Image (spheres, grey):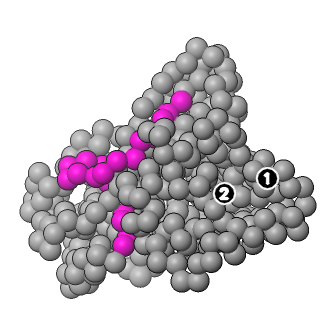
Amino acid sequence: MKYDYLIVGSGLFGSVFAYEMTKRGKKCLVIEKRDHIGGNVYTEEEHGINVHKYGAHIFHTDNKEIWNYINQFADFNRYTNSPIANYKGELYNLPFNMNTFYQMWGVMTPDKAKAKIEEQKKEANIENPTNLEEQAISLVGRDIYEKLVKGYTEKQWGRDCKDLPAFIIKRLPVRFTFDNNYFNDLFQGIPIGGYTKIIEKMLDGVELRLNTDFFDNKEEFLAIADKVLFTGMIDQYYGYCFGELEYRGLDFEFETLDMENYQGNAVINYTDRETPFTRIIEHKHFENAESDKTVITREYPKEWEKGEEAYYPLNDDRNSELFAKYKDLADKEDKVIFGGRLGMYQYFDMWKVIEEALKLVESLE
């Protein structure tokens, strides 16, 4: 059987593409190596709670067109992302705002908070930051860096902040208002009923094969479609011919508790270096689920190894140069198109994934 498009991966990018091309009368086949659709936005209901199986996914965007687009597949609630930071038992509001500064220093006015930060920046006297530590201190001072940036960042990247490039933190959000809304975007929320229902609607009427690894029958899959959208790792597609791109991995530890409310917030970050996980997610707070149980997830960042799920591209100079070599190969392809976070080796927010997929569809019309 011949297809117009073979789509490798049923994550958000592949599913938007399959939906749009099917709508245009194209015959699509989606193959997925996992036993479920949705990629990392996959949610699964447990005890009446929609559990984000691959970490917290909060939809946010300033793009009204993208917001309207995703809302055709689900109604969204008014969830506002207001994470809490736990530093050795001390609690701080995020992002850095007047609540944080009051908790940190007891200051109650924007002028006093600004003066405190400026005083610490002046003491540090860093004119040209050469690493992430210097960059962060030059932006927010030493106290905020030591308690709320250093440990969390070192766990996230698996490296000392002094060994991380300054460009990773180009800016740190600092607000001199009492506002705990993490995102500045105009539109924000969680799909009522979970993300999996969105992907199900996108793939309704599209031929789908789960538990199907493209690399088990690469030549056969390439032969059954006019074009292939590949949303996996670009270096894997090319047999790692230039070497492996680097990623950060994650381990998730799920626990169901016989209580209604474990931590009182959807996301609490653990910002000290000694706590092995970066955050605890309590899923019921995303949709205010009513249940006599609660489900929590502890997230443990780790070094990525080949064969494991890749989460965050390490876009440092070395990897960017390596990716450029793979992209040169990809640009010469007539049949295969690369898309998504792994195919384009770039971390995307969900709205950007949708925008990039729609751009690709338009370019092929």
Residue 23 image-quadrant placement: bottom left
Residue 2 highlighted magenta (yes or no): no
Expressed as whole percent of the image width and height from the top left, the position of residue 162 reads 43, 65
The disc placed on residue 105 is: 1
Judging depth in this view, the residue of 331 and 169 nearest the camera is 169
Q: Which residues are magenta?
A: 296-316
- Residue 230 can be seen, yes or no: no
Q: Which residue type carries mark 2? A: Asp
Asked if disc 2 and disc 1 are in contact, CB closer than 8 Å, the reply is yes
Residue that lies at the very extreme toward the front in this rendered image? 123
- Which residue was labeled with disc 2? 143
In this rendering, is residue 279 above or below 203? above
Judging depth in this view, the residue of 269 and 71 nearest the camera is 269
Report the quarter where the C terminus lies: bottom left
Which residue occupies 46% across, 78% down?
A: 130
Expressed as whole percent of the image width and height from the top left, the position of residue 202 reads 47, 53
Measure the C-alpha gap from mark 2 to mark 1.
9 Å
Which residue occupies 46% across, 72% down?
A: 131
- Residue 86 can be seen, yes or no: yes
In this rendering, is residue 138 above or below 109? below
Judging depth in this view, the residue of 44 and 249 nearest the camera is 249
Expressed as whole percent of the image width and height from the top left, the position of residue 64 reads 68, 69
